[in-house]
Image: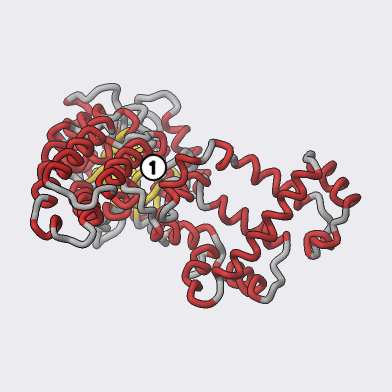
Amino acid sequence: MFETLTERLQQTFKRLSGRGKIRDKDIRTGMKDVQLALLEADVAYPVVKDFVRSVTDKALGENVLDGINPTQQIVKIVHDELVELLGSERAELRFAAQPPTVILLCGLQGSGKTTTAGKLALALRKDGHRPLLCATDVYRPAAIDQLRQVGEQVGVETFTLGEGDPVQITKAAFAHARSKSYDVLIVDTAGRLQINQEMMAELAAQAKAVGEAEVLLVVDAMTGQEAVNVAEQFGSTVDLDGLILTKLDGDARGGAALSARAVTGKPIMFVGVGEKLEALEAFHPERMAQRILGMGDVLTLVEKAQQAVDQEQALKLQQRLLQAEFDLEDFRDHLRNVRKMGPLDQIMKMIPGMAQQMPKMGPTDFDERELDQVEAIINSMTSEERHYPDVLNASRKRRVARGSGTSVQDVNIMLKEFRELSKMMKQLSGGGKARIGNMMFGLR
């Protein structure tokens, strides 16, 4: 996400940093580049206009012009304005004092609403809640079966009453949730091909049927400005509490994310960043601004590591490394844990400084199939070879290569990378860099 915008902004800041002293003219020229970058990212024009004017006014101040490093100060101004544009602070779900909390998901057909219901249910279950899914999309063929299948995948019950009245189904699901001690009810409402009053009236009736509900609009970020238009139209007819942007990983421009909150006045609560049911992230304005500017996102990276890695297993792994006992089985387990955190290219972008390096890398640098090959090579070894890689002579390597469907050269490359990684991780896990080492192992 935001690849195009990030690259353009970094180019602008690089040109500014190449000047000994930044003049008013340089700032105005730089802000024109920023404006063009935002427009190319499909950000709404009124939003771009206000954003650039605010940044320009602050960047022309004396404190910036007289600063030791004016370019860095301008970057900070842009960062702060981006945070403000995206909503300043993380918007949290409001949980009812008397359970269950009802979350109504609404949106157009094709926005990813049903899958998002499953993703949200999984995220809430991991946070210690007992969610219940409810299928009320009685108009789209197979919508009820789809939600039921999603519920099974995330280990959450799905309440259905077939093709009845959505309002009555919502009431029945609410009563069922209360009687069975579910503390969250996620209602998958009916989508439409276009916004109409009938749909809005039905949605309002469902919300009224349960007393008080969090109404979240699910919008497809890949539709760009149309996503913002849909959000604005929904917001003008229904009392929305927040937005969920889906398919943000597939939108290199990111205009919908930058425009949605400013246009609707409603906070972005979650973003979908992949097809897997685990690929739903809480939306943090400051972290997103850092990603847009290529600064990385260490906090989200640490959270992903903590979710993916068993703490006891990670501690044992770190201790084995510090005691020079880190072997190929540990290496394989660590790779598996890293892969649980998400696609490699997304993980790399969260590391500070990597965004600037990634344009220089080719698509093969993040080929997940290479990790499959590494695991196949390790699995083709005997227990002795995995524990003591130095016993791998030429004949053993040929056997491993045959067993894994690779070449001896591939085996040698994997062993070299294993030794280099072992050395690096040992350095990071000790001394003053313990915090970085803990992040790599997912330790708190």
Q: How is the image coloured?
A: secondary structure
State the residue lying farthest toward the front: 20
Please give left or right for residue 315 compared with residue 81 in the image. right
Residue appearing at x 35%, y 44% in the figure: 271
Percent of width and height locating residue 164:
34, 30
Please give left or right for residue 314 compared with residue 50 in the image. right
Q: Nearer the viewer, residue 139 or 411?
A: 411
Residue 210 appears in view = no
Percent of width and height locating residue 325:
71, 71
Residue 408 appears in view = yes
Please give left or right for residue 143 compared with residue 237 in the image. right
Percent of width and height locating residue 67:
17, 61
Quick check: 159 above or below 41?
Answer: below
Tell me where residue 264 sits by quadrant. Answer: top left
Q: Nearer the viewer, residue 134 or 193?
A: 193
Quick check: 89 above or below 326?
Answer: above
Image quadrant where one finds the N terminus = top left
Q: Amino acid at mark 1?
A: Gly
Q: Which residue is mark 1?
A: 272
Q: Nearer the viewer, residue 93 or 103?
A: 93
Residue appearing at x 34%, y 31% in the figure: 222
Residue appearing at x 46%, y 57% in the figure: 304
Tell me where residue 352 sits by quadrant. Answer: bottom left
Residue appearing at x 39%, y 60% in the figure: 299
Percent of width and height locating residue 92:
27, 56
Q: Nearer the viewer, residue 441 or 98?
A: 441
Q: Secondary structure at mark 1?
A: strand
